[in-house]
Image (cartoon, helix red, strand yellow):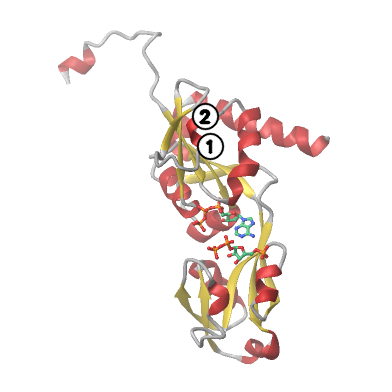
């Protein structure tokens, strides 16, 4: 305590490292140019697919980039382990973390969350009072069906949801759709659209309040998004 009080206040004190979390899959390709325009470029090793490192230096000395699963981006940022991140609004809505703030819609990673049923019995769930649903999004799914007065029992899967109805695991699925090809090729049809999705810049609320670099980055991403909208 005595030591902390006697520390001199020095303007040139080194700043702590910022951590920027990005999802490792499909959003990444679209996110990298957006990040570059905001002044954040990962080191060359980031693009090497055989590289097993998860944390990378960036063009900013005071920032590293971590590459994690999409759902984990929100977890790292909400807990303050990363100050900033990019993630789909599906993930933000599913978790609903109070410490997470999503100030900029990046207008990339567009898709939507939908209910899909077997083509041969499409519409059948409308009359059910209880349903078994395969999904990666149990919270959004329960909320959606509650609004319809249907109790949804969710079977949590992490991928290949489309297999569940034909194998008797669930009556329908709630999953992401972009081209619709996966549904079609697996004998399913979309019967209800739940949520339109795009990728967002997310920040930890406490970091935004206490670190001016976070607020500056939010402004840089916002200016870029506004420029693209105006173009
Ligand atoms: N067709 C699509 N299918 C899945 N996600 C899509 C699609 N189109 C856009 N997205 C967005 O991409 C996000 C997934 O991002 P990404 O693939 O980069 O993460 P990931 O870490 O590889 O995901 P996972 O945890 O499934 O491995 C979704 O949360 C969604 O917001
Ligand atoms: O409408 P489409 O363009 O066909 O895209 C939708 C598919 O893409 C996603 O899966 P992904 O490829 O991310 O694999 P996953 O099943 O492992 O999540 C999603 O879960 C759908 O299965």
Residue drawn at point x = 59 percent, y = 51 percent: 26
Image location (x, y in percent) of residue 173: 58, 76
Residue 53 higher or lower than 111, as above or below: above
Helix, strand, or loop for circle 1? Answer: helix
Contact check, label 1 and label 2, Cβ < 8 Å: yes
Image location (x, y in percent) of residue 95: 48, 58
Q: Quadrant of ligand 2?
A: bottom right
Q: Give the label on residue 47, or none.
A: 1
Locate the C terminus and report the quarter of the image it occupies.
Answer: top right
Whether residue 104 can be seen here: no
**To which residue does mark 2 refer?**
44
Question: Neighbour class for label 1 at 10 Å: few (<14), some, many (≥20)?
Answer: few
Residue drawn at point x = 37 percent, y = 15 percent: 14
Residue drawn at point x = 25 percent, y = 11 percent: 7
Residue drawn at point x = 66 percent, y = 34 percent: 222
Residue 38 higher or lower than 29, as above or below: above
**Residue 229 falls in which quadrant of the image?**
top right
Relative depth, front residue between 121 and 227: 121
Please give left or right for residue 2 compared with residue 123 in the image. left
**Residue 200 falls in which quadrant of the image?**
top right
Residue 108 higher or lower than 173, as above or below: above
Locate the N terminus and report the quarter of the image it occupies.
Answer: top left
Relative depth, front residue between 150 and 115: 115
């Amino acid at each position: 305590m005595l030591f902390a009080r006697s520390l001199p206040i020095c303007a040139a004190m080194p700043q702590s490292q910022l951590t920027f979390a990005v999802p490792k899959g499909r959003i990444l390709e679209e996110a990298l140019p957006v990040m570059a325009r905001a002044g954040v470029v990962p080191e060359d090793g980031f693009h090497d697919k055989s590289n097993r490192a998860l944390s990378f230096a960036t063009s900013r000395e005071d920032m590293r980039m971590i590459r994690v699963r999409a759902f984990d981006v929100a977890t790292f940022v909400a807990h303050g382990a990363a100050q900033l991140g990019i993630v789909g609004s599906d993930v933000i809505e599913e978790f609903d973390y109070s410490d997470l703030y999503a100030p900029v819609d990046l207008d990339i990673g567009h898709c939507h969350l939908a209910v899909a049923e077997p083509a041969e019995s499409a519409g059948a769930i409308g009359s059910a009072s209880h349903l078994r649903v395969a999904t990666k999004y149990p919270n959004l799914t329960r909320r959606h069906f509650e609004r319809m007065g249907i109790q949804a029992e969710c079977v949590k899967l992490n991928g290949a949801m489309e297999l569940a109805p034909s194998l008797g695991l669930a009556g329908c699925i709630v999953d992401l759709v972009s081209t619709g090809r996966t549904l079609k090729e697996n004998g399913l049809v979309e019967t209800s659209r739940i949520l339109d999705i795009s990728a967002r810049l997310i920040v930890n609320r406490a970091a935004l309040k206490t670190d001016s670099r976070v607020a500056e980055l939010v402004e840089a991403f916002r200016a870029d998004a506004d420029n693209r909208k105006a173009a």
